[in-house]
Image (spheres, grey):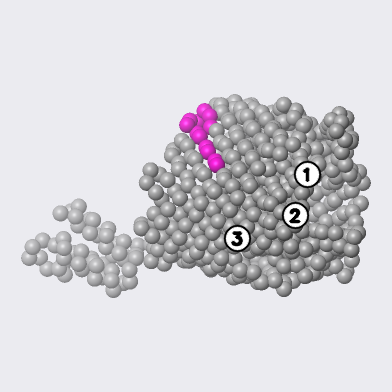
Amino acid sequence: MVSSRAAALVAAGLLAALTPASAVAEGDRDASMATAPAGASSDTETHTLPPVVVPRPPPDPSAPAPESPLRREPAGSISVIDAKAHRAEAVVAADLVTAAPGVQLQDRGGLLQSKTISVRGASSNGVLVLLDGVPLSGAGGAVDLAQIPVAIVDRFELIRGGGAQYGSGALGGVLNVVTRAPQDGPSVSGAVTWGSFGTEMGSVTATGDLLGGAGVVIVHGAHTDGTFRYQRDPTPLDDDASTVTALRQNNDVGQAGALVRYRRALGSDANRLEVMGELSFDDRGIAGDVQNPTPDRRMQSQRLIGSAALTHAFAEGGEVRMRAYGRRERSTFEGFFGPPLQTLLSGGLEVEGRRLLADVHGLTARAEVGYDGLETAAQSSSPQWLRLSASAADEILLRDGTISLVPGLRVDRNGPFTAFSPKLGASVLLPAGLTLRANAGQAHRTPSFVELYVVQGTVLPNPNLRPERALFADLGVERSSDVWRMGATGFYSLYEDLISYELYLGQSARPYNFSAARAMGAELEAALHPSALWSATASYTLTFSQNLRDDPRYYLQELPYRPRHKLSARLSGGVDWLSGRVELDAQSEQFVNRTGTTSVPARAFVNLGATCRLWRAPEVRLSLDLKNLLDAQGWDYAGYPLPGRAAYLTLSFSLDAGNGEGKT
């Protein structure tokens, strides 16, 4: 009898916290009557209990942000690349991202030299890159991943296929770079790298409690001379296959920057403030291709990004977030035909709300107003416009959540251009642990300021351009267990109104909307981690691309810079104090012109690395990385040589003062 009465009192207390006072009183009366002895008066058993306050669990700082593809595109083909596990290695952002299926790298040659990516056959300016949700697209549209240091990155979130919920630029995919979040408790970490071609890289990170919240500060810098020897054919039009040794020059890069993030609860855990600031400097030589070297071209750029977000979580589920962001990117050019100075200004204010209704509908609505402007040395080429967008999506859960339908629509107004981006995604949990995913929709890319308005020597703009459009669909299946995961996806993309430069009046080039193309293929990925001693990952991409322009010179020819086959694999293993890894990065031949007459050969690079822990507290590790171990000669882009064998030594440390580490 005592235990049953105690259970009734606990139940009544919980009801008091979750229901109005009148309902609590009624519940107490019912509970007391149910537990009273036979013949006893119910009045003698009535208890009045104080309200019970159930504290809200604190938000998880590692949970996906509202701009994450994991939340905006829950049925999409998404790859999450963890950067934390590679901080003791000599890697750059492109090394990690291109290991994902569906991604092709366009490398200008060198560890820190310019690197852009293509996803599912889309051009590099058709891949939208975000830094914590802030767009990074430049005046020309493409984003150089070499300007994103791994030291500031926590993970990369890549959606393969059109990102209809992200607006302009997401023709082939979206890459969201998630920076390192503040941690509770003080800690300091860092790494220094020395290596081939006069390369030096370093970073220091400090995080801990700050002003009632938590903050993190990261300072980083890097430099490489970039000079290396390679073999080239001095007479490529002759049948003579003899080569000579050449020296790659004007290939140096210098970088420096910092990242600051801060978060705290305001009043209660229901309100959360997050602030981010990023500053970077970049100075590099532009070496050109081997047939047209440019020993006097240089580019300097400075980037400043800031954002602040305020989130309120509702007790009954859901949240609303307001965020303001701004970006200023200044670029100076030497030895180019275009304006010697460009300053890109961009900013926006967005409001986003999420709500779960009837445990079936996960509704999301978003609105944004923004500004883009480009200032050049020639004041006649300084365009600007207003951006407006609105979107809505619903994640519909059916059959106890085993079926998920995700319809969505976004409308964008960028300056004079209006575009619609509808999408329907679905995921189904099948027997035997299988998950089926499917997506279909439309995405677009607004012409860039450079394509529309900026004169660059003999390259002229065209203010009559139309937005590029992509129609896409994919179907994938995956299965996983505690020790392995496998997935396969087929995709198809049709790109219309593609912008291409053609000769204008015999001597100049001008962009036009007369190209169309399609890309189709398959993506395979697998991961195996049977024990803590070793693991393996691999991805393979098969891409068929075709030019659909109605011109016999180009019709049905493969698109340039889209290799048909790409394979990435990594095997790692060891114990806590000593580990090793071997990587393979291979791709097939790729064409560099639209007629399919000029190509760069297939390549395969093997990398080898080892890491040894020298000290436990503070943790100190020493890593050796050998890139291109077999010293293979590789080429990329339009005849850019890639460096041969290289060695890098990295010394890293981590001091967690909150746990008392560092006392030796």
Residue at (89% x, 54% y) in the render: 336
Mark 3 and 2 residues: CB-CB less than 8 Å, in contact?
A: no
Work out whether residue 174 can be spotted: no
Which residue is disc 2 drawn over?
Answer: 552
Q: Residue furthest front?
A: 552
Quarter of the figure with residue 130: bottom right
The numbered mark at residue 471 is 3
Alpha carbons under labels 2 and 1: distance apart: 14 Å
Quadrant of the drawing holding the C terminus? top right
The disc, 2 or 1, on the residue closer to the chain's N-terminal end is: 2
Q: Is residue 534 magenta?
A: yes
Give the residue displayed 67% in from the left and 38% down from the top. Answer: 587
Q: How many marks?
A: 3
Q: Main secondary structure of the magenta part?
A: strand
Question: Looking at the rendering, which quadrant does residue 341 occupy?
Answer: bottom right
Residue 406 location in percent, x, y? 48, 61
- Which of these two is toward me, 201 or 547? 547
Mark 1 closeness class: few <14, some 14–19, many ≥20 residues within 10 Å = few
Confirm whether residue 409 shows in the render.
yes
Q: Which residues are magenta?
A: 524-535
User: Counting residues from the N terminus, which is met first, the one under dot 1 or under dot 3?
Assistant: 3
In the rendered structure, the answer to whether residue 317 lies left or right of residue 83 reads left
The residue drawn where x is 56% and y is 65% is: 422
Give the residue type that dot 3 points to: Leu
Q: Residues within 10 Å of mark 2 (few under 14, many from 20)?
A: few
The amino acid type found where label 2 is placed reads Pro
Local SS, label 3: strand
Mark number displayed over residue 388: none
Q: Identify the disc placed on residue 597.
A: 1
**Of the two numbered discs 1 and 3 in the rendering, the one whose residue sits closer to the viewer:** 1
Q: CA distance from mark 1 to mark 3?
A: 29 Å
Which badge, 3 or 2, comes first in the chain's sequence? 3
